[in-house]
Image: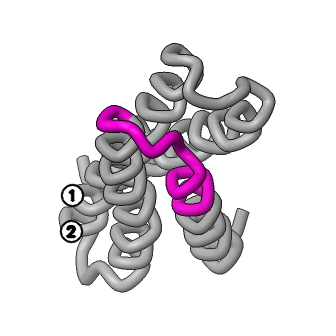
Amino acid sequence: MTTKELLKRTKDFAHRCVKLSVALPKTKLGYHIQGQLIRCSTSVAANYRATVISQSKKSFIAKISIVVEEIDESAFWLEFIIDENLMKKDRVSDLLKEAEELTSIFIASRKTASKKTK
């Protein structure tokens, strides 16, 4: 997968999470998850974008580590939406699958970069 494709994929992920978030129930829990999911999913896209312009391998590894944390947190909140029955599973499952795939991609990328710096 190219950098350009991942930039688009992470941005699309953020947009999809925002749309899902604003459709959550208008309850205290719904608003809490809405804020959390919007923050971490948009952080995935913004921080991945920062990895592209990183000036060193060390900087890349630091930034991609943030991306890994944020995409994993996004997956957590998507799972939590399902666990709490806030939305039907089929409405969330594709987005959760995308979070899991992106997590794998970014972990692999970090491992590759870390091997090259040793």
User: What scheme was used to colour the molecule?
Assistant: one colour
The image quarter containing residue 94 is top right
* In the image, residue 95 above or below residue 11: above
* Residue at which label 2 appears: 59
Magenta stretch: residue 20 in it? yes
43 sits left or right of 16 in the view: left
Magenta stretch: residue 54 in it? no
The image position of residue 51, as x and y in percent, is: 36, 72
Q: Residue furthest front?
A: 26
Write the start and end of the magenta stretch as one range. Answer: 17-29
Q: Mark 2 belongs to which amino acid?
A: Ser
* Residue at which label 1 appears: 62
Q: Residue at x 72, y 31 (%)?
A: 93
**Residue 47 bears which disc, if any?**
none
Are the residues at dot 1 and dot 2 in contact (C-beta closer than 8 Å)?
Answer: yes
The image position of residue 87, as x and y in percent, is: 64, 31
Q: Mark 1 belongs to which amino acid?
A: Ala
* In the image, residue 46 above or below residue 64: below
* Residue in the foreground of this view, choosing between 15 and 8: 15
